[in-house]
Amino acid sequence: MRRALALLVLAVFCLPAQDLPPGVLTLSRIRARVGQALDQLPDCTCVETVDRSWKPAGKEIKPVDRVVLQILLSGGQELFAAPGDTRWETDPSALLVGGMMGNGLFALVLKIIFLDNVSVIKYKGDESAAGRREARYDFSVSRMVSGTTIYNANGSGVVGMRGSFWADPETYDLRRLEYHAEEIPPDLLYADISTTIRYDRVRIGDRDVLLPQAADLRTTGVDGENKWNHIEFTHCQGFRTASTLRFGAADASPAAGPAAAPPQPVVEGALPPGLRITVALSAPLDDHAPVGSLIEGKVADSVMQKGKVLVPQGSLVQGRIRRLERYSDAGDYFILALEFMRIETPSASLRFYSDLQDVDRPRGVDMMLATTNVERSEFHWDTNNTYEKSTKIDHVLIRTQEVPGVGTFFVRGSHFSLPPGFKTVWKTQLYPRSAHP
């Protein structure tokens, strides 16, 4: 009997992959992919832009402010600094007077869901979003094992998690994650806390790594008050640390003092603010290109300042597609966003942190998109044998959320192809990095 039981167990574990329940093999590969992404997460910095909004109970939502921070990822830890500051904090709220902020979006939540073996995950089938097939899974994490803590002015408390994630069933890359806090302690006075994170691959150094691209954090109070943070992560790049070798007698042991500051990014060439730079695409760009694809351009005209060439004509400009979405609410059109990050000159590597000023205007391309709604009312007056007609025309301007360092524009049509040489005009801005001591 014991031998028969052992053979039965062996038979179960030797079932071929095709006999596994749907989604099980895919889930194991998604877990492995997330683990690989976290293991390969390099030390890097990103610009974090947070647009904060507030909706009092029973009233309209209104914007509160925009926060721009520098986020440093080092050794799996997230640190934050205000632009121009040298003090790094583990809690971004410490840099602000008030308002809602959050952290842990890069690694902490992924470890809890995918690697710590504390989540219950169920396959829910494949779905299609924006023409892309994705595998959906629902998950839950008990408050007893989540280790997730919520802080606000009323105190703090540990919460559970319940939500869904979507992944590419072919590459096993995580695409989107949505979850709500569960078992929220009553004294925190929250009815709901939800988080949505969108992921994509970003080139850091010589490799592509999976990083959050954007996130939304929303809270609903028990009194009906709503708060919403929309977060964009841009201009991510790796950094190296420098070491010093000293020869001769050893120095006296330094006196005990504050803990050493985290490693600082290598100082690179930076362009002064206010320069206009025209970039021409090196290759065609069409609506089949996936978001995150690397793109290249060349500086169309030499950039001068005080009679000196700062950036020679033909210098290589490197970037990626930040956003490419098709809409049909005002006829077919696309929202296209480009993020150029670096200029390579014969003598230097320069950060490219600029705001889009203008684009070439072939048919269908524009910086703004306006729609026209026409309502007609007709009146007939038989007694005087007259005819009268009135027409009402409404013009609606479609706007996009501006992100520092990212250029967004519109392309009308069901398809598009921008040719090599398509030009975008940018104005350099002061990069919000931390100063060095």
Image (spheres, rainbow, N blue to C red):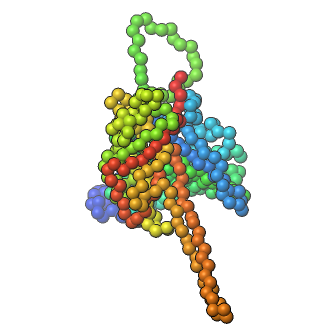
- In the foreground, 193 or 281: 281
x, y (%) of residue 60?
68, 60
Quarter in which the N terminus is drawn:
bottom left
Which residue is at a point 62% across and 49% down the rendered structure image? Answer: 52
Marker count (numbered): 0
Residue 316 falls left or right of residue 143: left
Q: Of all residues shown, which one is farthest toward the bottom?
A: 383
Q: Name, please, the residue furthest toward the top.
A: 249
From this view, report whether residue 131 is shown above or below residue 230. below
- 39 with respect to 221 (left or right): left
Residue sitting at 63 percent across and 37 percent down?
Answer: 94
Let me know if residue 222 appears in the view: no
Residue 194 location, quadrant: bottom right
Q: Is residue 55 visible?
A: yes
Instruction: Tell me which corner region of the image, top left, top right, bottom left or bottom right, holds residue 21.
Output: bottom left
Q: In this picture, is 174 found above or below 209?
A: below
Where is residue 32 shown, x and y percent of the image?
A: 37, 49
Task: Indicate the position of residue 297 as horizontal and vertical percent values.
Answer: 35, 44
Q: Residue drawn 46% across and 43% down?
A: 426
Judging depth in this view, the residue of 311 and 380 nearest the camera is: 380
Residue appearing at x 50%, y 28% in the figure: 262
Q: Tell which of 425 and 16 is nearer to you.
A: 425
Q: Position of residue 136 (x, y in %)?
A: 43, 61
Q: Is residue 9 left or right of residue 358?
A: left
